[in-house]
Image: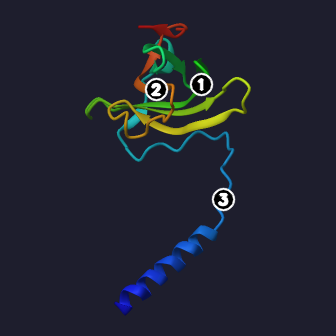
Amino acid sequence: MHGMIVLAVLAAGIGAASAQTPLPPPQQSQQPPQRPGNSNLRPVPDGPGTRSAELQGLDKVTARTQRFYVPVGKSTRFGTLEITVGDCLVNVPEAPPESVAYLTIVDHKPGQAEEKLFAGWMFASTPSLSALDHGVYDLRVLSCTMAQGSSPPSSR
């Protein structure tokens, strides 16, 4: 019993010490995102068009889905969300198919300060691995591709 009390006090002390350690401020760097640790991932091979992420958004209020392309390094709007694609990678041909995009998502609700909701890699094969947590919108990566021309969001 005495050992359990000592262990509880020690754990509480460690928790209190770690709670007092300030977190470093977030980096506001414009450098490209660090690539996921998969050596099979590479940019989409060059071809006609613009290297882009194909995304699908769901408006949970209206139950409408939209598919749209966002060029790497550019932004687009989906509802109140501003989605920026930092990079878009695919697996080499001999590996299982995979597309992964680095997205930064900022919510611009009218009359409120902008709120950064997500910044990270989203995987097409496992959308729940790193998902956007929002009450109105869902967003997922479908593929990385060479998009032809511009494609505004289209309802389905």
According to the image, what is the colour scheme of the structure? rainbow
User: Where residue 81 sits in the image (x, y, percent)?
Assistant: 59, 24
Tag 1–tag 2 contact (CB < 8 Å): yes
Would you place residue 52 above or below residue 14 in this image?
above
Closer to the chain start, of discs 1 and 2, is 1
> Looking at the image, which is closer to me, 118 or 120?
118
Q: Which numbered dot is residue 139?
A: 2
1, 128: nearer the viewer: 1
Amino acid type of the residue that numbered disc 2 sits on in the rendered structure? Leu
Q: Report which residue position mark 3 lands on.
A: 24
- Position in image of residue 96 (x %, y %): 26, 33
Q: Is residue 102 depicted above or below 8 in this figure?
A: above
Q: Residues within 10 Å of mark 1 (few under 14, many from 20)?
A: some
| Image vertical order of residue 39 relative to residue 111, above or below | below
Mark 3 burial class by Cα count in 10 Å: few <14, some 14-19, many 20+: few
Is 73 left, or right, of 2 in this rendering? Answer: right
Residue 115 occupies which quadrant of the picture?
Answer: top right
